[in-house]
Image: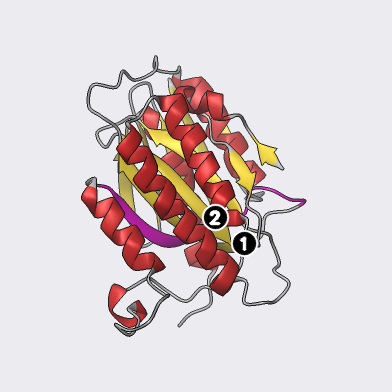
Amino acid sequence: MADGDVKDLYDGGFPAWALPPDETGAGFARSVVKAVFGTLGLPAELTYDTAVALSELATNVHRHALGGTAPAGLPELWAYVRWGKRREVVLKVYDSAPWRGTISPGPLRPHPASEGGRGFEVVAALTAEHGGRWGIHRTRSRLGARPVPGKAVFVAMPIPADTPPPAPKPDRLVAEEMYALLAARGLGRMHGSYGYGMAVICVRAGVHIWIREDSLSYCAPGHGTARHPLSDAIEVVEQVVQRCEDLDAPPG
């Protein structure tokens, strides 16, 4: 199952794929990376290293995140592009396993004689090699009958500076697309309005998004206000979903 077309990535698409929860997931992840990077015309070495990193994340989901139990939501793979000051392609592997906090390389490092357990170290090394970044955050699923809380491990790789960006979208269209993406994640308490040259999306108490002609910004309790270019609309949607999940998480 897939939602969206990889061909739409250049123009602000946000495709999602169902990631096989078994040993075939690694190969599937590699094929998605090749399709994404091929569509964007990115270098072969960057494509290869990112494919290796994503296959490690897919393998980790199969071996550890699912834990041999029936998950509330099946794994997913997402992709989008940021065209603002930080130009990068972002890929995320979602699973519905319980949140265990941020990833720290120290506790995860296996014994030197071990033949496995180095997946996150591989991901960290490959992203650092290209000046990219990686991490983990709470989120909600995108496929299936209803959104399911979980987490996403992401890899973000830089796009060559000479890659031409797409034509900018009108701010009202950006607002409509953001509203639709948030509604699809089950944030049903929100409402939106447009007037005086600005769109406002009220997601929940204390979480608001403002879309203007040349920029967008959002606020969330404990994080203040963050400002982004319009081309970072999907990144802002992802951050807002993360903030909402963090607010709903049990203490401790």
Location of the C terminus by quadrant is: bottom left
Badge 2 density bin: few <14, some 14–19, many ≥20, Cα 10 Å: many
**Residue hosting label 2:** 26
Magenta span contains residue 137: yes
- Can residue 205 be seen here? no
Image coordinates for residue 109, horizontal then vertical, percent = 32, 78
Instruction: Give the residue type at disc 2.
Output: Ala
Q: How many marks?
A: 2
Give the SS element for disc 2.
helix
User: Which residue position holds label 1?
Assistant: 23
Q: Residue furthest top?
A: 167
The numbered disc on residue 123 is none
Q: What residue type is labelled 1?
A: Glu
Q: Can residue 229 be seen in this view?
A: yes
At 62% from the left and 44% from the top, the residue drawn is: 17
Residue 72 % position (x, y) = 71, 67
Give the percent coordinates (x, y) of residue 204.
Answer: 55, 52
57 relative position to 179: left or right? left
Mark 1 lies on a secondary structure that is loop
Q: Which span is picked out in magenta? A: 132-145
**Position of residue 141 measured from the top left corner of the image (x, y, whole percent):** 62, 54
Q: In this view, does 88 lie to the left or right of 130?
A: right
Picture quadrant of residue 170: top left
Name the residue nearer the viewer: 30 or 97: 30
94 is within the stretch colored magenta: no
Query: Residue sitting at 57 percent across and 64 percent down?
Result: 150
Q: Is there CB contact under 8 Å for labels 1 and 2?
A: yes
Disc 1 versus disc 2: distance between alpha carbons? 7 Å
Note whether 163 is above or below 66 in the view shown. Answer: above
Give whichever of 75, 46 is nearer the camera.
Answer: 46
Instruction: Check disc 1: other Cα within 10 Å, few if <14, some if 14-19, many if 20+.
Output: few
Position of 37 compared to 35: left or right? left
